[in-house]
Amino acid sequence: MEARFQDSGSKRVADVDRKRVLVIDDDLPLRGMLAAALRKHGFQVLLAGDGEEGQRALNLHHPHVILLDLAMPRVNGWDFLQRLKETGHLGRVPIIVVSAHLRVEPQAVLQMGVSAILPKPFNLPELIDLIEHLAP
């Protein structure tokens, strides 16, 4: 059974070695597609529907990389980034903004402390390469 921001499997010894990717996006079909693709490439996947769920998942599971949409209900990606900045957690985990709503210049997004930007629709192999490059 999968919780909204937890991996679908129980904790196994093999999971300790797998890179954890937190996907924060309100698009349920996209989250499902990303989860399946990332698991296929050996990542442990955590899912969140908005920045509030993402913050809880970040605190509980300490992901290696975060994929973040900007336009979401309740706590959006900008608010999530601002909270990380205020708490001093921004920059501790690489963040890839994956969004169709880049209303500002990409440079402004990068100045918020994110590691990379990938506009939607994105190329899945490019995203996988980026995650592998950024995961410590």
Image (cartoon, rainbow, N blue to C red):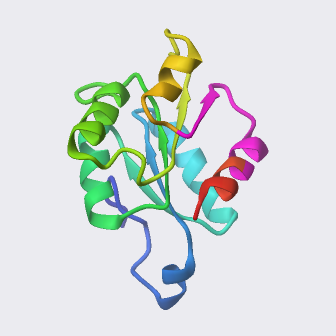
Give percent across and percent down for residue 15: 50, 80
The residue depicted at 55 percent of the width and 40 percent of the height is: 115
Does 50 appear above or below 17? above
Q: What percent of the width, then of the height, locates residue 9?
A: 44, 74
Q: Is 113 or 125 nearer to us in this picture?
A: 113
Q: Residue at x 68, y 58 (%)?
A: 132
- Who's the residue at 46% across and 86% down the image? 12
Check residue 65 for magenta coloring: no
Q: Dividing the image into 4 quarters, which one contains the N terminus?
A: bottom left
Indicate whether residue 120 is drawn in magenta.
yes
Q: Which quadrant, please, contains the C terminus?
A: bottom right
Q: Is residue 109 above or below residue 29?
A: above
Q: Which residue is drawn at 26% across and 59% down?
A: 59
Instruction: Give the farthest residue toward the bottom.
Output: 13
Q: In this view, does 4 lie to the left or right of 16?
A: left
Q: In which quarter of the image is residue 86?
A: top left
Q: Is residue 84 left or right of residue 128?
A: left
Does the rendering let one see residue 37? no
Tell me which segment is drawn in magenta: 115-129
Quarter assignment of residue 43 = bottom right
Numbered marks: total: 0
Of the pair 76 and 34, the residue shown nearer to us: 76
Residue 46 can be seen in this image: yes
**Where does residue 113 sit, x and y in percent of width and height?**
45, 35
Q: Please say if 41 is above or below 73.
A: below
| Percent coordinates x, y for residue 107 in the rendering | 56, 19
